[in-house]
Amino acid sequence: MDLTTLIVNYNTAGLLSECIGALRKSSKNITHEIVLVDNASVDDSVALLKAKYSDCKLILNDKNVGFGRANNQCIPFAQGRYVLLLNTDAFVSEDTIDKTIAYMDKHSECGVLGVKLLGREGDLQPSCRYFPKPWNLFLRASGLRRFCNGVQDIDDMDWGHDKPRKCDWVPGCYYLIRKEVINEVGLFDPRYFLYYEEVDHCFSIKKAGWQVHFYADTTVVHIGGESAKTEGVLSSSGKQLDVLKYESELLYFRKNLGHGAVLNHLVLSTLVDIINLVKKVIKLKFGTGLVDSFKLSYLLWSLYFKTRMATRATR
């Protein structure tokens, strides 16, 4: 078997036909299997999966276990040389599967491969990313990034996206993994309910001596945030659920960079709120109260204690 594709669905019945149809069209030249997980959807997803995709392996959860844990459930059924994690809101091009598998066959050092991601209107999305650290997150959130050009930004877009390149991590919406890598380092840490699971996974992969590559010669259309819409209010900046995102962020820093990095991140995040408050005072913009000005740092500090100093997930 060349490829096993894992698709986790949560309330995206309207996207399944387009996603799986594009996938099957792109994988005609290889031996391929699909494993589908439904995370207790409340829309028409389960009925659609049973009626239209009975030829696939179906896993029906009775509760939403999160993205990473749901993908982990599929691994015992994966027979492919490669495993592809594909979001229901990601639509591959006709040449995507053939080209990315051929690239992996040619580059034995590559453990994980991502591709060029585009929005519906053809806008380029961050596709080749660098590990988050307390300092580069602080520079971005505070608006001071432009004064520190020597610091690697997480989403550095100032380079040509027309050639393959090594990077730290690639988004999980199209995430092609060598099965050998999964056998060696596993898949996702189950503590991450949503967000940061692929960041953490790539960190482990690189630590084990493998490389993470960005492949430029095919595209995947990615909408983003479709499942998250049903869980709560999306953050205005990145279509992400703030609580889940920041919890995973703390868990990631504690696991991979240590407790000191977590405390550093908390202090710097509090400083961001202070800087933003000072900006409001200077501009005479008093639309929000003092408490509202410290929403980010309050959320992070509260999550720090709820996760027992960033060691345990809350769900």
Image (cartoon, helix red, strand yellow):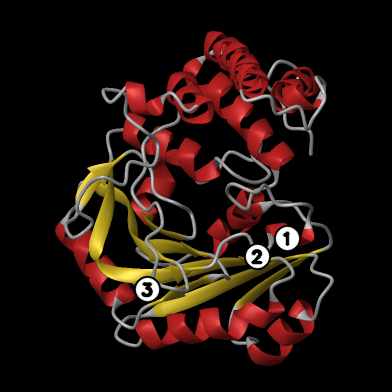
What kind of element bears circle 1? helix
Q: Nearer the viewer, mark 2 or mark 3?
A: 2
Kindly check if marks 1 and 2 are in contact, taking CB atoms under 8 A apart as contact: yes
Q: Amino acid at mark 3?
A: Met
Q: Is residue 43 above or below residue 204?
A: below
Q: Residue furthest front?
A: 284
At x 33%, y 70%, the residue is 219
Instruction: Read off the residue under disc 1.
Output: 229
**Which is nearer the eye, 155 or 207?**
155
Residue 1 image label: 3
Residue 226 image label: 2
Kindly check if marks 2 and 3 are in contact, taking CB atoms under 8 A apart as contact: no
Separation of residues labelled 2 and 3 (CA atoms): 31 Å
At x 22%, y 47%, the residue is 159
Tell me if 245 is positioned left or right of 43 in this view: left
Q: Residue furthest bottom?
A: 51
Q: Where is residue 49 drawn, in percent x and y? A: 69, 82
Tell me if 205 is positioned left or right of 158 in this view: right
- Kindly tell me whether residue 291 is visible in this rendering: yes
Number of numbered labels in the structure image: 3
Kindly check if marks 1 and 3 are in contact, taking CB atoms under 8 A apart as contact: no
Q: Quadrant of residue 119?
A: bottom left
At x 63%, y 86%, the residue is 53
**Which is nearer the eye, 37 or 223?**
223
Q: Is residue 211 above or below residue 54?
A: above
Q: Amino acid at mark 1?
A: Lys
Q: Quadrant of residue 290?
A: top right
Q: Amino acid at mark 2?
A: Glu
Separation of residues labelled 1 and 2 (CA atoms): 5 Å
